[in-house]
Amino acid sequence: MLLLPALAVVGFVAIYPLGKTIYYSFTNQEFLAGIEPTKWVGLRNYRELWHDSIFRTAIWTTIKFTLITVGFEFVLGMIIALVVNSNFRGRGAMRAVMLVPWAIPTVVAAQMWKWMFDDVYGVINDAGVRLHLLSHSRAWISEPGTALASVCAVDIWKTTPFVALLLLAGLQVIPRDLYEAASVDGASKLQQFWRITLPLLRPAILVTLIFRTLDALRVFDVFYVFFGNRPDTQTMAIYDQATIVGDGHVGYGSAVSVAIFLIIGLFVVIYVTFMRVTEE
Amino acid sequence: MSTVAEATRARARPVSRGRWLRRSPVGRFVTKVPFWLLIAVIFVYALFPFYWAIRSAFTPDGEQFKTPIDYFPKHPTWANFREALSASTFQHALINSTIVAGAVTLISLAIGSLAAYALGRFRFRGKSAVLYLMLSMTIFPQIAILGALYTMINDFHLYDTLGALILSYMIFTLPFTVWVLTSFMRGLPGDLEEAAYVDGATPLQVFYKVLLPLIAPGLVTTGLLAFIAAWNEYLYALSFIQTPNHYTVPLSITTFVGKSGSTFQQPWGQIMAATVIVTLPLITATLILQRRILAGLTAGAVKG
Protein backbone atom coordinates (compact mmCIF):
# COMPACT_ATOMS: atom_id res chain seq x y z
CA MET A 1 0.00 0.00 0.00
CA LEU A 2 2.64 2.47 1.10
CA LEU A 3 4.92 1.20 -1.60
CA LEU A 4 2.38 1.59 -4.35
CA PRO A 5 3.19 5.19 -5.38
CA ALA A 6 6.91 4.53 -5.50
CA LEU A 7 6.53 1.32 -7.46
CA ALA A 8 4.06 2.94 -9.84
CA VAL A 9 6.45 5.81 -10.58
CA VAL A 10 9.46 3.54 -11.02
CA GLY A 11 7.43 1.22 -13.22
CA PHE A 12 6.17 4.08 -15.33
CA VAL A 13 9.37 6.06 -15.82
CA ALA A 14 11.90 3.24 -15.83
CA ILE A 15 10.66 -0.28 -16.36
CA TYR A 16 8.00 0.43 -18.96
CA PRO A 17 10.40 2.58 -21.03
CA LEU A 18 13.06 -0.09 -20.73
CA GLY A 19 10.66 -2.67 -22.17
CA LYS A 20 9.66 -0.21 -24.86
CA THR A 21 13.30 0.45 -25.74
CA ILE A 22 13.93 -3.26 -26.18
CA TYR A 23 10.85 -3.50 -28.39
CA TYR A 24 11.90 -0.47 -30.46
CA SER A 25 15.31 -2.00 -31.02
CA PHE A 26 13.63 -4.61 -33.23
CA THR A 27 11.73 -2.02 -35.29
CA ASN A 28 12.56 0.76 -37.68
CA GLN A 29 10.81 3.33 -35.45
CA GLU A 30 11.55 6.93 -36.40
CA PHE A 31 10.82 9.95 -34.23
CA LEU A 32 9.00 11.80 -36.98
CA ALA A 33 6.15 9.53 -37.95
CA GLY A 34 5.16 9.28 -41.59
CA ILE A 35 8.59 8.96 -43.12
CA GLU A 36 8.14 5.26 -43.32
CA PRO A 37 5.56 3.03 -41.62
CA THR A 38 7.00 1.52 -38.46
CA LYS A 39 7.43 -2.20 -38.76
CA TRP A 40 9.19 -5.14 -37.14
CA VAL A 41 12.63 -5.60 -38.65
CA GLY A 42 13.93 -8.43 -36.52
CA LEU A 43 17.65 -8.32 -35.88
CA ARG A 44 18.46 -5.88 -38.66
CA ASN A 45 19.42 -3.05 -36.25
CA TYR A 46 21.73 -5.34 -34.34
CA ARG A 47 23.36 -6.64 -37.52
CA GLU A 48 24.03 -3.08 -38.63
CA LEU A 49 25.31 -2.19 -35.19
CA TRP A 50 27.79 -5.05 -35.32
CA HIS A 51 29.40 -3.45 -38.38
CA ASP A 52 29.03 0.12 -37.14
CA SER A 53 32.59 1.44 -36.93
CA ILE A 54 31.56 4.74 -35.31
CA PHE A 55 29.96 2.87 -32.46
CA ARG A 56 33.01 0.67 -32.14
CA THR A 57 35.22 3.76 -31.80
CA ALA A 58 32.78 5.12 -29.22
CA ILE A 59 33.05 1.92 -27.18
CA TRP A 60 36.84 2.18 -27.20
CA THR A 61 36.82 5.82 -26.25
CA THR A 62 34.47 5.09 -23.36
CA ILE A 63 36.48 2.13 -22.12
CA LYS A 64 39.77 4.04 -22.33
CA PHE A 65 38.18 6.92 -20.45
CA THR A 66 36.86 4.51 -17.81
CA LEU A 67 40.17 2.75 -17.24
CA ILE A 68 42.15 5.98 -17.05
CA THR A 69 39.79 7.89 -14.78
CA VAL A 70 38.90 5.05 -12.43
CA GLY A 71 42.58 4.10 -12.11
CA PHE A 72 43.76 7.62 -11.32
CA GLU A 73 40.81 8.39 -9.08
CA PHE A 74 41.41 5.24 -7.09
CA VAL A 75 45.14 5.73 -6.57
CA LEU A 76 44.91 9.47 -5.88
CA GLY A 77 41.79 8.99 -3.77
CA MET A 78 43.57 6.38 -1.69
CA ILE A 79 46.55 8.66 -1.09
CA ILE A 80 44.29 11.54 -0.09
CA ALA A 81 42.20 9.30 2.17
CA LEU A 82 45.30 8.01 3.96
CA VAL A 83 46.64 11.53 4.43
CA VAL A 84 43.36 12.92 5.72
CA ASN A 85 42.85 9.88 7.95
CA SER A 86 45.91 10.75 10.05
CA ASN A 87 45.30 13.13 12.91
CA PHE A 88 46.21 16.72 12.21
CA ARG A 89 44.86 20.16 12.85
CA GLY A 90 42.54 21.36 10.10
CA ARG A 91 41.30 17.90 9.18
CA GLY A 92 37.70 19.08 9.26
CA ALA A 93 38.50 21.96 6.94
CA MET A 94 40.27 19.56 4.61
CA ARG A 95 37.22 17.36 4.41
CA ALA A 96 35.07 20.37 3.65
CA VAL A 97 37.46 21.40 0.88
CA MET A 98 37.17 17.95 -0.63
CA LEU A 99 33.42 18.34 -0.99
CA VAL A 100 33.79 21.44 -3.16
CA PRO A 101 34.61 19.69 -6.48
CA TRP A 102 31.89 17.17 -5.76
CA ALA A 103 29.25 19.88 -5.27
CA ILE A 104 30.08 21.62 -8.56
CA PRO A 105 27.76 20.47 -11.38
CA THR A 106 29.62 18.38 -13.98
CA VAL A 107 28.66 20.71 -16.80
CA VAL A 108 29.89 23.70 -14.84
CA ALA A 109 33.14 21.93 -13.95
CA ALA A 110 33.59 21.10 -17.63
CA GLN A 111 33.14 24.76 -18.57
CA MET A 112 35.60 25.86 -15.92
CA TRP A 113 38.24 23.49 -17.24
CA LYS A 114 37.48 24.28 -20.85
CA TRP A 115 38.38 27.86 -20.05
CA MET A 116 41.51 26.77 -18.16
CA PHE A 117 42.51 24.67 -21.19
CA ASP A 118 41.93 27.59 -23.60
CA ASP A 119 44.61 27.53 -26.30
CA VAL A 120 45.42 31.25 -26.08
CA TYR A 121 44.26 32.64 -22.73
CA GLY A 122 44.12 29.45 -20.71
CA VAL A 123 45.85 29.30 -17.35
CA ILE A 124 47.20 25.80 -17.99
CA ASN A 125 49.18 26.92 -21.00
CA ASP A 126 50.33 30.04 -19.20
CA ALA A 127 51.45 28.25 -16.05
CA GLY A 128 53.02 25.45 -18.08
CA VAL A 129 55.10 27.86 -20.13
CA ARG A 130 56.09 29.95 -17.10
CA LEU A 131 57.23 26.89 -15.19
CA HIS A 132 59.01 25.61 -18.32
CA LEU A 133 56.92 22.47 -18.36
CA LEU A 134 55.66 23.40 -21.81
CA SER A 135 57.71 24.77 -24.66
CA HIS A 136 54.70 26.44 -26.26
CA SER A 137 50.94 26.80 -25.79
CA ARG A 138 48.88 23.87 -26.97
CA ALA A 139 45.28 23.43 -28.08
CA TRP A 140 44.62 20.72 -25.51
CA ILE A 141 41.02 20.08 -26.40
CA SER A 142 41.20 20.13 -30.18
CA GLU A 143 44.48 18.24 -30.63
CA PRO A 144 43.63 14.54 -30.98
CA GLY A 145 46.67 13.57 -28.91
CA THR A 146 45.58 15.41 -25.77
CA ALA A 147 41.78 15.49 -26.21
CA LEU A 148 41.09 12.37 -24.17
CA ALA A 149 43.59 13.36 -21.48
CA SER A 150 41.91 16.75 -21.10
CA VAL A 151 38.44 15.28 -20.43
CA CYS A 152 39.97 12.74 -18.08
CA ALA A 153 41.56 15.60 -16.14
CA VAL A 154 38.14 17.14 -15.51
CA ASP A 155 36.60 13.90 -14.32
CA ILE A 156 39.59 13.03 -12.15
CA TRP A 157 39.48 16.47 -10.54
CA LYS A 158 35.76 16.32 -9.90
CA THR A 159 35.55 12.75 -8.64
CA THR A 160 38.82 11.97 -6.84
CA PRO A 161 37.76 13.79 -3.66
CA PHE A 162 34.52 11.83 -3.67
CA VAL A 163 36.39 8.54 -4.01
CA ALA A 164 38.68 9.68 -1.20
CA LEU A 165 35.70 10.42 1.03
CA LEU A 166 34.20 6.98 0.41
CA LEU A 167 37.53 5.29 1.17
CA LEU A 168 38.00 7.53 4.19
CA ALA A 169 34.66 6.36 5.57
CA GLY A 170 35.95 2.80 5.24
CA LEU A 171 39.30 3.66 6.82
CA GLN A 172 37.72 5.14 9.90
CA VAL A 173 36.00 1.89 10.73
CA ILE A 174 39.33 0.05 11.05
CA PRO A 175 40.19 -0.17 14.77
CA ARG A 176 43.30 1.77 15.75
CA ASP A 177 44.64 -0.91 18.12
CA LEU A 178 45.38 -3.15 15.15
CA TYR A 179 48.00 -0.66 13.99
CA GLU A 180 49.37 -0.26 17.49
CA ALA A 181 49.72 -4.00 17.88
CA ALA A 182 51.42 -4.18 14.49
CA SER A 183 53.97 -1.48 15.31
CA VAL A 184 54.74 -3.17 18.62
CA ASP A 185 55.49 -6.30 16.58
CA GLY A 186 57.81 -4.23 14.43
CA ALA A 187 55.77 -4.02 11.24
CA SER A 188 56.71 -1.09 9.01
CA LYS A 189 54.13 1.43 7.82
CA LEU A 190 54.17 -0.16 4.38
CA GLN A 191 53.64 -3.62 5.81
CA GLN A 192 50.79 -2.28 7.91
CA PHE A 193 49.21 -0.84 4.79
CA TRP A 194 49.43 -4.10 2.81
CA ARG A 195 48.52 -6.43 5.66
CA ILE A 196 45.93 -4.46 7.63
CA THR A 197 44.56 -1.51 5.69
CA LEU A 198 44.05 -3.05 2.27
CA PRO A 199 42.38 -6.32 3.37
CA LEU A 200 40.04 -4.57 5.80
CA LEU A 201 39.24 -1.88 3.28
CA ARG A 202 38.32 -4.42 0.61
CA PRO A 203 34.52 -4.03 0.77
CA ALA A 204 34.75 -0.24 0.61
CA ILE A 205 37.25 -0.45 -2.26
CA LEU A 206 35.13 -2.82 -4.32
CA VAL A 207 31.94 -0.85 -3.89
CA THR A 208 33.73 2.39 -4.77
CA LEU A 209 35.26 0.82 -7.86
CA ILE A 210 31.95 -0.61 -9.05
CA PHE A 211 30.11 2.67 -8.63
CA ARG A 212 32.85 4.64 -10.34
CA THR A 213 33.16 2.21 -13.24
CA LEU A 214 29.44 2.17 -13.94
CA ASP A 215 29.37 5.94 -13.71
CA ALA A 216 32.31 6.37 -16.06
CA LEU A 217 30.85 3.99 -18.65
CA ARG A 218 27.78 6.19 -19.12
CA VAL A 219 29.78 9.44 -19.29
CA PHE A 220 28.10 12.13 -21.35
CA ASP A 221 28.33 15.66 -19.93
CA VAL A 222 32.07 16.38 -20.01
CA PHE A 223 32.57 14.95 -23.49
CA TYR A 224 29.58 16.83 -24.84
CA VAL A 225 30.71 20.17 -23.39
CA PHE A 226 34.27 19.66 -24.66
CA PHE A 227 33.67 18.16 -28.08
CA GLY A 228 29.96 18.21 -28.96
CA ASN A 229 29.42 15.40 -31.45
CA ARG A 230 32.98 15.31 -32.78
CA PRO A 231 33.14 11.75 -34.18
CA ASP A 232 36.63 10.81 -32.99
CA THR A 233 35.81 11.64 -29.38
CA GLN A 234 32.29 10.31 -28.96
CA THR A 235 31.32 8.15 -26.03
CA MET A 236 28.68 5.45 -26.26
CA ALA A 237 26.13 7.73 -24.61
CA ILE A 238 26.87 10.64 -26.95
CA TYR A 239 26.56 8.48 -30.05
CA ASP A 240 23.26 7.12 -28.78
CA GLN A 241 21.86 10.54 -27.93
CA ALA A 242 22.88 11.90 -31.33
CA THR A 243 21.25 8.93 -33.09
CA ILE A 244 17.96 9.20 -31.20
CA VAL A 245 17.51 12.93 -30.74
CA GLY A 246 19.75 14.39 -33.42
CA ASP A 247 18.83 12.03 -36.25
CA GLY A 248 15.51 10.78 -34.91
CA HIS A 249 16.41 7.13 -35.51
CA VAL A 250 14.62 5.82 -32.44
CA GLY A 251 14.72 2.17 -33.55
CA TYR A 252 18.43 2.03 -34.30
CA GLY A 253 19.25 4.21 -31.29
CA SER A 254 17.32 1.81 -29.08
CA ALA A 255 19.49 -1.03 -30.32
CA VAL A 256 22.49 1.10 -29.32
CA SER A 257 20.86 1.61 -25.90
CA VAL A 258 20.42 -2.12 -25.42
CA ALA A 259 24.05 -2.66 -26.43
CA ILE A 260 25.21 -0.08 -23.87
CA PHE A 261 23.04 -1.72 -21.27
CA LEU A 262 24.61 -5.11 -22.03
CA ILE A 263 28.16 -3.74 -21.98
CA ILE A 264 27.57 -2.14 -18.58
CA GLY A 265 25.94 -5.38 -17.42
CA LEU A 266 29.04 -7.26 -18.54
CA PHE A 267 31.19 -5.09 -16.28
CA VAL A 268 28.85 -5.76 -13.35
CA VAL A 269 29.17 -9.51 -13.98
CA ILE A 270 32.97 -9.24 -14.14
CA TYR A 271 33.08 -7.37 -10.82
CA VAL A 272 30.68 -9.71 -9.06
CA THR A 273 32.58 -12.81 -10.22
CA PHE A 274 35.83 -11.20 -9.18
CA MET A 275 34.37 -10.53 -5.73
CA ARG A 276 33.17 -14.13 -5.41
CA VAL A 277 36.45 -15.62 -6.60
CA THR A 278 38.69 -13.56 -4.34
CA GLU A 279 36.47 -14.15 -1.33
CA GLU A 280 37.15 -17.87 -1.40
CA MET B 1 67.10 -9.19 -4.38
CA SER B 2 69.06 -8.16 -1.32
CA THR B 3 71.30 -10.39 0.76
CA VAL B 4 70.80 -10.88 4.48
CA ALA B 5 73.70 -8.58 5.28
CA GLU B 6 72.28 -5.82 3.17
CA ALA B 7 68.91 -6.26 4.77
CA THR B 8 70.29 -5.91 8.27
CA ARG B 9 72.31 -2.87 7.29
CA ALA B 10 69.26 -1.34 5.68
CA ARG B 11 67.23 -2.00 8.79
CA ALA B 12 69.84 -0.69 11.16
CA ARG B 13 70.04 2.76 9.64
CA PRO B 14 66.39 3.81 9.54
CA VAL B 15 65.95 2.89 13.20
CA SER B 16 68.57 5.33 14.41
CA ARG B 17 67.47 7.96 11.96
CA GLY B 18 63.87 7.32 12.91
CA ARG B 19 64.67 7.80 16.58
CA TRP B 20 66.41 11.07 15.86
CA LEU B 21 63.47 12.22 13.79
CA ARG B 22 61.00 11.34 16.50
CA ARG B 23 62.91 12.70 19.48
CA SER B 24 64.41 16.04 18.57
CA PRO B 25 62.08 19.00 17.85
CA VAL B 26 63.96 19.79 14.64
CA GLY B 27 63.58 16.20 13.54
CA ARG B 28 59.89 16.25 14.26
CA PHE B 29 59.56 19.38 12.19
CA VAL B 30 61.47 17.80 9.30
CA THR B 31 59.21 14.74 9.19
CA LYS B 32 56.15 16.97 9.17
CA VAL B 33 57.26 19.04 6.18
CA PRO B 34 56.45 16.51 3.42
CA PHE B 35 53.16 15.81 5.11
CA TRP B 36 52.08 19.43 5.15
CA LEU B 37 53.38 19.86 1.64
CA LEU B 38 51.12 17.03 0.53
CA ILE B 39 48.19 18.62 2.35
CA ALA B 40 48.93 21.91 0.60
CA VAL B 41 49.07 20.21 -2.81
CA ILE B 42 45.71 18.50 -2.24
CA PHE B 43 44.24 21.76 -1.04
CA VAL B 44 45.41 23.72 -4.07
CA TYR B 45 44.42 20.95 -6.48
CA ALA B 46 40.89 20.79 -5.10
CA LEU B 47 40.31 24.53 -4.99
CA PHE B 48 42.34 26.06 -7.80
CA PRO B 49 39.79 25.55 -10.62
CA PHE B 50 37.13 27.14 -8.49
CA TYR B 51 39.48 29.99 -7.61
CA TRP B 52 40.16 30.42 -11.31
CA ALA B 53 36.44 30.68 -12.05
CA ILE B 54 36.10 33.35 -9.38
CA ARG B 55 39.12 35.32 -10.57
CA SER B 56 37.91 35.17 -14.19
CA ALA B 57 34.44 36.26 -13.11
CA PHE B 58 35.91 39.40 -11.54
CA THR B 59 38.30 40.15 -14.39
CA PRO B 60 37.16 42.70 -16.96
CA ASP B 61 37.25 41.56 -20.60
CA GLY B 62 40.18 43.82 -21.41
CA GLU B 63 42.39 41.96 -18.94
CA GLN B 64 40.79 38.59 -19.58
CA PHE B 65 41.85 38.28 -23.17
CA LYS B 66 45.48 39.27 -23.14
CA THR B 67 48.74 37.42 -22.57
CA PRO B 68 50.60 36.92 -20.32
CA ILE B 69 47.62 36.49 -18.05
CA ASP B 70 47.25 37.91 -14.54
CA TYR B 71 46.66 35.51 -11.69
CA PHE B 72 44.72 38.09 -9.76
CA PRO B 73 42.38 40.67 -11.33
CA LYS B 74 44.10 44.07 -11.35
CA HIS B 75 40.82 45.94 -11.65
CA PRO B 76 38.17 43.66 -10.12
CA THR B 77 34.70 44.36 -11.42
CA TRP B 78 31.11 43.16 -10.95
CA ALA B 79 30.39 43.81 -14.63
CA ASN B 80 30.47 40.12 -15.59
CA PHE B 81 28.01 39.26 -12.84
CA ARG B 82 25.69 42.08 -13.84
CA GLU B 83 25.73 41.07 -17.48
CA ALA B 84 25.29 37.38 -16.76
CA LEU B 85 22.34 38.05 -14.50
CA SER B 86 20.73 40.41 -16.97
CA ALA B 87 20.79 37.82 -19.75
CA SER B 88 17.19 36.68 -19.99
CA THR B 89 18.04 33.06 -20.85
CA PHE B 90 20.08 32.78 -17.71
CA GLN B 91 17.34 34.37 -15.58
CA HIS B 92 14.82 31.92 -17.00
CA ALA B 93 17.26 29.07 -16.46
CA LEU B 94 17.66 29.88 -12.77
CA ILE B 95 13.88 29.92 -12.32
CA ASN B 96 13.34 26.79 -14.44
CA SER B 97 16.01 24.81 -12.63
CA THR B 98 14.62 25.86 -9.25
CA ILE B 99 11.12 24.75 -10.28
CA VAL B 100 12.27 21.43 -11.74
CA ALA B 101 14.73 20.51 -8.98
CA GLY B 102 12.33 21.70 -6.27
CA ALA B 103 9.37 19.73 -7.65
CA VAL B 104 11.44 16.61 -8.22
CA THR B 105 12.84 16.80 -4.69
CA LEU B 106 9.45 17.29 -3.02
CA ILE B 107 7.73 14.54 -4.98
CA SER B 108 10.61 12.12 -4.40
CA LEU B 109 10.65 12.84 -0.68
CA ALA B 110 6.88 12.45 -0.34
CA ILE B 111 6.68 9.18 -2.26
CA GLY B 112 10.07 7.98 -1.12
CA SER B 113 9.48 8.42 2.61
CA LEU B 114 6.26 6.38 2.41
CA ALA B 115 8.11 3.61 0.62
CA ALA B 116 11.00 3.85 3.06
CA TYR B 117 8.53 3.54 5.93
CA ALA B 118 7.22 0.29 4.47
CA LEU B 119 10.69 -1.04 3.64
CA GLY B 120 12.35 0.06 6.85
CA ARG B 121 9.73 -0.76 9.46
CA PHE B 122 7.67 -3.72 8.19
CA ARG B 123 8.34 -7.29 7.19
CA PHE B 124 6.57 -8.57 4.12
CA ARG B 125 7.08 -10.85 1.19
CA GLY B 126 9.03 -9.46 -1.72
CA LYS B 127 10.64 -6.78 0.41
CA SER B 128 14.19 -7.64 -0.53
CA ALA B 129 13.13 -7.84 -4.18
CA VAL B 130 11.86 -4.27 -3.97
CA LEU B 131 15.05 -3.14 -2.25
CA TYR B 132 17.19 -4.76 -4.91
CA LEU B 133 15.05 -3.16 -7.59
CA MET B 134 15.61 0.27 -6.04
CA LEU B 135 19.34 -0.34 -5.67
CA SER B 136 19.72 -1.48 -9.26
CA MET B 137 17.78 1.60 -10.37
CA THR B 138 20.30 3.90 -8.71
CA ILE B 139 22.98 2.64 -11.08
CA PHE B 140 20.62 2.48 -14.05
CA PRO B 141 22.14 4.09 -17.14
CA GLN B 142 19.76 6.87 -18.11
CA ILE B 143 20.79 6.65 -21.72
CA ALA B 144 19.30 3.16 -21.92
CA ILE B 145 15.73 4.44 -22.01
CA LEU B 146 16.24 7.68 -23.89
CA GLY B 147 14.49 6.49 -27.05
CA ALA B 148 11.37 5.26 -25.28
CA LEU B 149 11.18 8.32 -23.02
CA TYR B 150 11.58 10.56 -26.03
CA THR B 151 8.55 9.09 -27.79
CA MET B 152 6.54 8.88 -24.54
CA ILE B 153 7.15 12.52 -23.73
CA ASN B 154 6.15 13.43 -27.24
CA ASP B 155 2.95 11.35 -26.98
CA PHE B 156 1.99 13.12 -23.76
CA HIS B 157 2.68 16.50 -25.39
CA LEU B 158 5.33 17.21 -22.79
CA TYR B 159 8.16 17.83 -25.26
CA ASP B 160 9.94 21.11 -24.56
CA THR B 161 8.19 21.58 -21.20
CA LEU B 162 9.52 21.48 -17.67
CA GLY B 163 7.04 18.65 -17.01
CA ALA B 164 9.13 16.38 -19.22
CA LEU B 165 12.11 16.95 -16.97
CA ILE B 166 10.18 16.58 -13.70
CA LEU B 167 8.83 13.25 -14.93
CA SER B 168 12.09 11.89 -16.27
CA TYR B 169 14.27 13.00 -13.34
CA MET B 170 12.24 10.71 -11.09
CA ILE B 171 14.22 7.86 -12.60
CA PHE B 172 17.30 8.73 -10.64
CA THR B 173 16.00 10.74 -7.66
CA LEU B 174 13.25 8.40 -6.47
CA PRO B 175 15.18 5.11 -6.14
CA PHE B 176 18.02 6.97 -4.47
CA THR B 177 15.63 8.66 -2.02
CA VAL B 178 13.93 5.37 -1.19
CA TRP B 179 17.26 3.64 -0.65
CA VAL B 180 18.82 6.26 1.62
CA LEU B 181 15.64 6.97 3.60
CA THR B 182 15.15 3.25 4.18
CA SER B 183 18.56 3.09 5.82
CA PHE B 184 17.60 6.06 8.01
CA MET B 185 14.26 4.44 8.93
CA ARG B 186 15.99 1.19 9.86
CA GLY B 187 18.29 3.01 12.22
CA LEU B 188 15.44 4.25 14.44
CA PRO B 189 14.74 2.38 17.68
CA GLY B 190 11.49 0.39 17.75
CA ASP B 191 10.26 1.41 21.22
CA LEU B 192 8.81 4.77 20.25
CA GLU B 193 6.63 3.26 17.60
CA GLU B 194 5.41 0.57 19.94
CA ALA B 195 4.47 3.14 22.57
CA ALA B 196 2.45 5.00 19.96
CA TYR B 197 0.70 1.82 18.82
CA VAL B 198 -0.18 1.00 22.44
CA ASP B 199 -1.77 4.44 22.68
CA GLY B 200 -3.94 3.49 19.73
CA ALA B 201 -2.23 5.29 16.86
CA THR B 202 -2.70 4.05 13.28
CA PRO B 203 0.35 3.23 11.17
CA LEU B 204 -0.10 6.44 9.20
CA GLN B 205 -0.28 8.51 12.37
CA VAL B 206 2.87 6.79 13.60
CA PHE B 207 4.49 7.71 10.31
CA TYR B 208 3.54 11.39 10.39
CA LYS B 209 3.77 12.10 14.09
CA VAL B 210 6.61 9.86 15.27
CA LEU B 211 8.88 8.71 12.48
CA LEU B 212 8.88 11.66 10.10
CA PRO B 213 10.05 14.19 12.71
CA LEU B 214 12.74 11.73 13.78
CA ILE B 215 14.19 11.35 10.32
CA ALA B 216 13.89 15.06 9.52
CA PRO B 217 17.69 15.42 9.31
CA GLY B 218 17.72 12.49 6.91
CA LEU B 219 15.02 14.13 4.83
CA VAL B 220 17.02 17.35 4.57
CA THR B 221 20.17 15.55 3.49
CA THR B 222 18.45 13.25 1.03
CA GLY B 223 16.47 16.18 -0.29
CA LEU B 224 19.63 18.18 -0.87
CA LEU B 225 21.30 15.29 -2.68
CA ALA B 226 18.24 14.79 -4.88
CA PHE B 227 18.08 18.53 -5.52
CA ILE B 228 21.73 18.63 -6.57
CA ALA B 229 21.28 15.64 -8.87
CA ALA B 230 18.28 17.25 -10.57
CA TRP B 231 19.94 20.67 -10.70
CA ASN B 232 22.98 19.18 -12.46
CA GLU B 233 21.26 16.89 -14.97
CA TYR B 234 22.23 17.51 -18.57
CA LEU B 235 21.43 14.59 -20.91
CA TYR B 236 17.63 14.67 -20.60
CA ALA B 237 17.50 18.46 -20.51
CA LEU B 238 19.51 18.57 -23.72
CA SER B 239 17.24 15.99 -25.35
CA PHE B 240 13.79 17.17 -24.23
CA ILE B 241 14.13 20.96 -24.19
CA GLN B 242 14.38 23.15 -27.25
CA THR B 243 13.27 26.70 -26.51
CA PRO B 244 15.97 28.82 -24.82
CA ASN B 245 13.41 30.19 -22.36
CA HIS B 246 12.82 26.65 -21.12
CA TYR B 247 16.53 25.96 -20.62
CA THR B 248 17.77 24.71 -17.29
CA VAL B 249 20.99 25.99 -15.74
CA PRO B 250 23.37 23.43 -17.30
CA LEU B 251 21.89 24.11 -20.74
CA SER B 252 22.21 27.85 -20.37
CA ILE B 253 25.79 27.59 -19.07
CA THR B 254 26.89 25.61 -22.10
CA THR B 255 25.15 27.85 -24.61
CA PHE B 256 26.02 31.17 -23.04
CA VAL B 257 26.35 33.89 -25.65
CA GLY B 258 26.26 36.80 -23.27
CA LYS B 259 24.69 40.13 -23.91
CA SER B 260 27.00 41.52 -26.53
CA GLY B 261 26.31 38.38 -28.55
CA SER B 262 29.80 38.22 -29.97
CA THR B 263 30.34 34.92 -31.71
CA PHE B 264 34.05 35.46 -32.24
CA GLN B 265 35.21 35.08 -28.65
CA GLN B 266 33.20 33.24 -26.04
CA PRO B 267 32.34 35.58 -23.16
CA TRP B 268 34.38 33.61 -20.64
CA GLY B 269 34.15 36.28 -17.95
CA GLN B 270 30.36 36.10 -18.00
CA ILE B 271 30.33 32.33 -18.26
CA MET B 272 32.55 32.12 -15.20
CA ALA B 273 30.35 34.64 -13.36
CA ALA B 274 27.37 32.43 -14.18
CA THR B 275 29.17 29.30 -12.97
CA VAL B 276 30.04 31.03 -9.70
CA ILE B 277 26.42 32.14 -9.27
CA VAL B 278 25.04 28.62 -9.74
CA THR B 279 27.65 26.79 -7.67
CA LEU B 280 27.91 29.11 -4.69
CA PRO B 281 24.52 28.13 -3.20
CA LEU B 282 25.31 24.44 -3.73
CA ILE B 283 28.70 24.73 -2.09
CA THR B 284 27.30 26.72 0.82
CA ALA B 285 24.51 24.21 1.43
CA THR B 286 26.97 21.34 1.12
CA LEU B 287 29.38 22.85 3.62
CA ILE B 288 26.63 23.61 6.12
CA LEU B 289 25.30 20.06 5.92
CA GLN B 290 28.76 18.56 5.47
CA ARG B 291 28.59 15.85 8.10
CA ARG B 292 25.12 14.72 7.17
CA ILE B 293 25.92 14.64 3.48
CA LEU B 294 28.88 12.41 4.12
CA ALA B 295 26.63 10.09 6.10
CA GLY B 296 24.00 10.13 3.33
CA LEU B 297 26.51 9.52 0.56
CA THR B 298 28.14 6.63 2.32
CA ALA B 299 24.73 5.16 3.14
CA GLY B 300 23.85 5.43 -0.53
CA ALA B 301 27.06 3.94 -1.81
CA VAL B 302 28.95 1.88 0.72
CA LYS B 303 26.00 -0.10 1.99
CA GLY B 304 25.41 -1.37 -1.54
Image: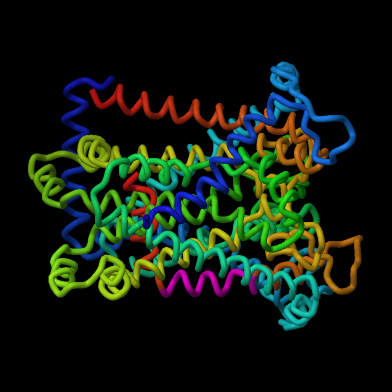
Q: Is residue A211 magenta?
A: no
Q: Residue at x 78, y 52 (%)?
A: A119
Which of these two is toward me, B53 or B132?
B132
Which of these two is toward me, A179 or B192?
B192
Residue B176 location, x and y as percent? 44, 53
Q: Residue at x 80, y 75 (%)?
A: B88
Q: Is residue A198 left or right of residue A74?
A: left
Check the picture and name the quadrant holding the N terminus of chain A. bottom left
Q: Is residue A101 left or right of residue A74?
A: right
Q: Quadrant of residue B100?
A: bottom right
Residue interval drawn in magenta: B276-288
Relative vertical location of residue A101 with respect to residue B135 in this rendering, above or below? below
Relative vertical location of residue A36 with respect to residue B186 in this rendering, above or below? above
Residue A89 location, x and y as percent? 30, 69
Which of these two is toward me, B41 or B111?
B111
Q: Is residue A187 left or right of residue A223?
A: left
Check the picture and name the quadrant holding the C terminus of chain A. top left
Q: Is residue B280 magenta?
A: yes
Q: In this orientation, does residue A89 appear?
A: no
